[in-house]
Amino acid sequence: MTARTDLAAHLAALDLPQGLTQTLTVAAAACVDIKAVVAGGALVGALGASGAVNVQDEEQKKLDVIANDILTDALMACPVVAGVASEEMDTVHPATNPAGEYLVLFDPLDGSSNIDINAPVGTIVSVLKAPSAAPTEADFLQSGRRQVAALYCLYGGQTMLVLTTGRGVAGFTLSPDGCWLMTHEDIRIPADTKEFAINMSNQRHWAESVQRYIDGCLQGADGPRGKNFNMRWVAAMVADVHRILMRGGVFLYPWDKREPNKPGKLRLMYEGNPMSFLVEQAGGKSTTDGKQAILDVTPTELHQRVPVVLGSANEVDEIAAA
Ligand SMILES: O=P(O)(O)OC[C@H]1O[C@](O)(COP(=O)(O)O)[C@@H](O)[C@@H]1O
Ligand SMILES: [Mg+2]
Ligand SMILES: [Mg+2]
C-alpha cells in the first residue's frame, strides 16, 4: 500500500503560519473526540434531548452540548486561539490567551435531527484572524472572505475531514488508528449537474424564482431543462455539501416567506461562510440567491441567518436566471 500524506504533513507543506497550523490541528483532534462520542451513541449516553434550548430557540440534543464542550475546551486551551463562538452558545467567548491570534467559530454538531436515527452528522469550523488578543463580539463579525481556513468533519460511513486554507480543498479519512490520511487531493466540483437538494416540504413558502427553478427540474426531460434530475436531502448540511464536493449538485436552503426577518434557516458565521469558502475553493459557487456571494455578505450579528444556494457553477447560474 502506498504511504499517504497525513494532515500534519499536508499542513506543513502549505507553509502556514505556525499558529494557524496549531489551531487546525487542535480542531481536527477535537473532531476525533466528537467522532468517538457519535460512534458510542446510546452506549455512552449520547442520544436524546439535553432538556435545554439554545439561543436560537432550538431544542439542544445531548450531542450538541457534548460536541460544543469538546471543541470549546480544546480551542480555549490552545494558546494561539483568541476566542471562540458557536451555534450552541449565546455570546462569544474570549480566551484571555495573551498570544491569541485566531478566532474560531463552529457548528459543533450539524444535522442534529439525524443523531437519534444514526444518520450522518458533522462539525463545521471557520477560522478568522483575531484583530486583538482580547476580542469583542464585533471582532468576530468579519465577512467570509476574510476566513483563513474552513473545514468540516463528516461522521458518516467513514469519518472524513475536508479542509481549505485558501489553496484548494483536500479531504482526509480517519484511519482505524486515529490518523487523518489524505484520500481526496484537490477536490473539484463539476460545473454541471442533474442533482438538486432542497427540503420540498417548504415549497409553498419559497419565492417565485425558486418555485420556477425546481418546477423545471421536476419536469425533467419533458420540460425546459431537457434532462431528468435526481433529488437528495440528507438534512445535514455537511453531508449534502460533501455529496456536492464529491460528485456535483446544487443545495438550496432558500429565503422563504414564513419569517421575513429570518432570511433562511442556516447560519452565516458557522454554516454559510465556512461551507462557501470550501465550495468556492473547489470551483463551485455559493450564493444567497444564485447571484450574491455569501462570502461578501457583511455580518451584523453573531447568529445571523442567510439563504443558501450553492454547488455546481453552471447550475447555480441557472437558479440565478430562473
Ligand atoms: O430539517 P430541515 O428543515 O430539512 O433542515 C435541515 C438543515 O438544518 C440543519 O440541520 C441545521 O443544522 P443544525 O443541526 O446544526 O441546527 C442543516 O444541517 C440542514 O441542512
Ligand atoms: Mg448546522
Ligand atoms: Mg448544529
Image (tube, grey):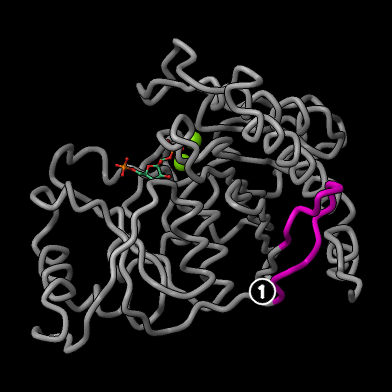
Instruction: Identify the image quadrant of the N terminus.
Output: bottom right
**In this picture, is 192 found above or below 87?**
below
**In this picture, is 167 found above or below 274?**
below
The residue most toward the top is 51
The percent coordinates of residue 37 (x first, y second) are 67, 29
Residue 49 lies left or right of residue 38; in this view the side is: left
Residue 237 lies left or right of residue 27; in this view the side is: left
The percent coordinates of residue 281 (x first, y second) are 58, 72
Residue 158 lies left or right of residue 217; in this view the side is: right
Residue 80: say if magenta: no
**In this picture, is 49 found above or below 214?**
above
Query: Quadrant location of residue 162?
Result: bottom right
Instruction: Identify the image quadrant of the C terminus.
Output: bottom left
Q: Which residue, given by chain and number where applicable, does mark 1 sit on?
A: 168
The percent coordinates of residue 96 (x first, y second) are 79, 24
Magenta residue span: 172-185
- Residue drawn where x is 44% and y is 37% of the image: 114
Residue 268 lies left or right of residue 228; in this view the side is: right
Q: Residues within 10 Å of mark 1 (few under 14, many from 20)?
A: some
* Foreground of the two, 229 or 168: 229
- Residue drawn where x is 59% and y is 32% of the image: 85
Look at the numbered disc 1 and give the secondary structure of its residue.
loop
Query: Quadrant location of residue 26?
Result: top right
**In this picture, is 52 found above or below 226?**
above
The percent coordinates of residue 223 (x first, y second) are 9, 83
Mark 1 near ligand 1 (CB under 8 Å)? no
